[in-house]
Amino acid sequence: MKYALLSIFIALCIATAIDHSTRSNVQSEVPILYWVTNISSARVKQVELFHEWIKERGYPEFEVRLDSTNSDASKKLIQGVSGVGADIISMVRDEAWLFHATGMLEDLRPLAKKHGFTLDQTWGVAAHSFMVGREQVGFPRSMSLQTYFLNVRLFEKYGVPLPSLRWTVGEFEKTAQAFVAAANQGRDPRDRIFFCDIVNVATLRRGMGRSVMNETMTRCTLDNPESIRVIKLIHKWTYEDRIIPTQADLDFFAGSDTNTSRIQLFIRDRYALLTGGRYSLVQLREHSELKMEVRMTPYESFPNTLLGTGSVGIYKNSKHKELAAYLLEFFTSETYNMSVVRTADAIPPIPSYSSTEEYLHPADHPLEWQIHQETSDLMAYAVAPEASPFILPTSFNRIESEYRLAALAGIYTPEEGMARAEDFVNREIEQTISADPQLRAKYDKLLKQQELIERLRAEGKKVPAHLITNPFYQRYYRERGWSTDT
Amino acid sequence: MRIKHPTFRRLVTGLSFLGPSIIGFMAFTMIPLVLSFILAFTNWDVRRHNMFRTEQIEFIGWDNFERMFSHPAFWQYLSNTLFFMLGIPVAIIGSLVAALLLTKELNGPSGLRRIHFIAMGVLMISLAVLLFTGFDFGNMLLLIVLLFAGILLAGLVGKATVYRTMFYAPHFTAGVATFLLWKKMYNPHTGPVNAALRPVVSTIQDVFQTLPPAIGPILGVLGVALGLTLMAFLFRRIGQAWTDGDLGRGALIGLSFISLLPAYLGWRWMEGSWLVILVLLGNLGLLLFFVVRRSLQPPFRQVAPSVGFANLVLPLTGGIVGQLIFIGLAMVAVQLPAMAATGEMAPPDWLANFYWAKPAIMIMAFWAAVGSNNMILYIAGITNIPQELYEASEIDGANAWQKFWNVTWPQLAPVTFFIVVMSVIHGLQGGFEMARAMTQGGPAGATTTLSYFVFIEGFESGRLGYASAVVWALFAMVMFVTLLNFKFGNRHVND
């Protein structure tokens, strides 16, 4: 028996050695860099272009490979802090702040200067997604604005006048009620046509002049009349007016909460308005040439749009940081930006390419011309998401959505739900800062700033802009004339 | 140097065989276990304590535990976990019933024919019901007929082995795959669950629209009465056990308190509706009549205070679950006329509704548990029961139920004890895969269990120290319940 076991053990060792030596990963003659990101046909194409680009420019030869299996935030985090992260890391939403807090991202300032991917190259409003304090931890590869795509034909079919580019909550509600009444007359409830797929809660709240965090991002401020009103509005629109689908309606569409399914349903006339960014055009183009226009999320007093930024950072433990910097340099190149323009994958990271003729008036897609112009116009209202250094965005989002959904389901009243959510988030913040003396010092400093802001506001004086760290309030105060640059 | 001593050589040989296992155990179980215990008392946060930062991990004593016990989320998730565990008695009964069915003789031609005739009859009745209630019959009819015909045919050829394999199938099917399958099945509009329920709900709506509104409260009272009947049966057993000297005073008091649980839970969940008041008063009355009245009389013999607790706690828990189900059905029945009047009665939105998400997952867990290892254990246990006992009971004139209650069930006590212990352990630890694959812990935290909470804290928030503390608190609970089981539960087993 022992000889049999020994034989099996030896056989397994040999098989492992053969497998290891025959893998293409270890056989490559050039360095291989792994880029952990979501995979798409556009991304694959961009990598191909990158390889051609480095050859053309005579840069050192190396290979970038896409790794989509580890693109989940928690995997990136755990692998990163364990020393086995990918060389190049895609970051969405507020992940740059999370990864920076762990120290796993390279401070790119020297490399950015050398390769020319500095902050002044890209959209200033996107800075929040890759600049943490004074450190640069990434560079944008794509931008998107959360807007509505409007199906013009459907409005014409049901005789509802087209709303204007910017619209108030009241105008939105009135138009939506008229639309669903006209579109669903005599229709089976299961085939209901909705006005829009979702309403972005953050944008709606901001449209009422309120952020989820205070001016210095030190405290959560969900327990306020605006957040409560947002829940009541969503509840009314979902269950009374039936202008947006319930969870049951979404389930009916079999996995329609994913972007692809929502687009499919939009194409099949189940929504008059589709939430999305320019990236949605990639799929919309594949299926149909719809006559579309763009609309802003409705607002009450402060028109705004939510800016999404996909940025890319370099892992601190990578052996190929210098090589990885070439990819970030590539994002500033004409080759890359024009590829983004042509595929409609996103708004290009370098602003000048979004005013090119090819961007605004793509020859093969004349029905889109108005969309691109309107999106460019709405860029003026773009605000980055809030990212507090004192609570993880994933934790914040989980808590906020948990209590919001509970309030929508009637488990709590909106007032109770928001009070509980605020308390929960503030507990998390307290926990984070109590365990970290460095962060505590930063927090205390910001708390003093917050007190100063509140005192100045109470006295009716202008607030120095540098005291405000919340990107929404930075803009809100400026627009309202409440802040001063001095 | 050549080793000559035979004992030493044997030792080396033995160790070389055991070595890989010992190394594996130490590396992947023992050392992580010890480390996680140490971590529970530290502030390890991957955001601050990792290879890129210089901060030192600090011992913070009981801070993690203090924070955990003072956090409302912990109690909510613990309550979710315990709620899911209410399904354990039902699942055990399901496994037992499956095992009893699967150990029936299928070899005799007449017995075999009878069983298949019954199965065919059930099939035909089911199809008739579906047809009557307006079920869309084309493809579904063909599907069902073929499915059942296939099963019956397989049973004819392969006998009980085929059915045992089929029942055990959920256990060796990949978990995530089955969870996704159930997710599809629960789809409120396209899933087969609601497709089957829709005509039933529609018929109920039609029927209730024609009935007077008073029918709701009448059915509600009926539901409560059924629940009370169930409890009466259990209270009677408890009282009888006291009289017979099979129950200690401590056990009697403990069981009496536990029996009031449905009324308490009903009060909390249903905000003191008149039905719950009825349940509360009914349970109290039954308790007074069957238990307190008897406990005032001296028992047949004096026993230690804790004796008999374990014998009755499992049936009592099953009864409590049963009564809760009846209370729930009664509540629904009361509201049925009003719901029918709206004309919008529909099957539930299973996984997206806060109130239905937990029952939906429990139903799925029940399906998985019926054909699990528990069933295999029960089959083994039933096979080992000496036939002489059945023969003796037959000579005494026992009917099928009496044979089960007085022979099979007591003989299965060791198996049941093992299953209860393991189910409780799995119940406390479980829920992660289902929550992750089906609901992401939602809606509104309704399906977040402690194990999912550990994942959130450890891998989403990066607080490994705190997550370890939750894990060890969970371990303490498992240990405590297991010790209770061993302290009280195995007495009956060893009798």
Image (spheres, coloured by chain):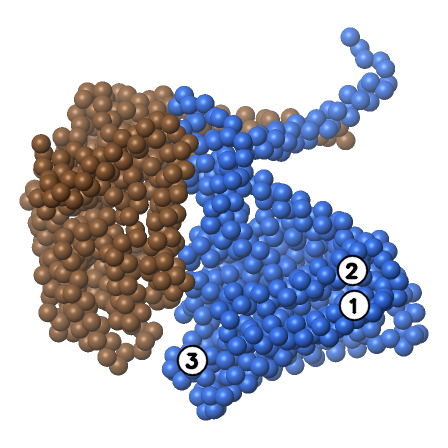
Chain colours: A brown, B blue
Q: Which quadrant of the view contains residue B380? A: bottom right
Label 3 is placed on what type of residue? Met
Residue of label 1: B295
The picture places residue B414, in percent across and down from the top left corner, at 79, 55
Q: Chain of mark 2?
A: B
Q: Earlier in the sequence, mark 3 or mark 2?
A: 2
Observer-nearest residue: A153 or A435? A435
Q: Chain of mark 3?
A: B
Q: Secondary structure at mark 3?
A: helix
The picture places residue B249, in percent across and down from the top left corner, at 78, 60
Residue of label 2: B249
Q: Secondary structure at mark 1?
A: helix
- For label 3, count other residues whose C-alpha is less than 10 Å away and answer few (under 14), some (14-19) or many (20+): some
The picture places residue B459, in percent across and down from the top left corner, at 45, 39
The picture places residue A79, in percent across and down from the top left corner, at 43, 32
Q: Residue at x 56, y 41 (%)?
A: B471
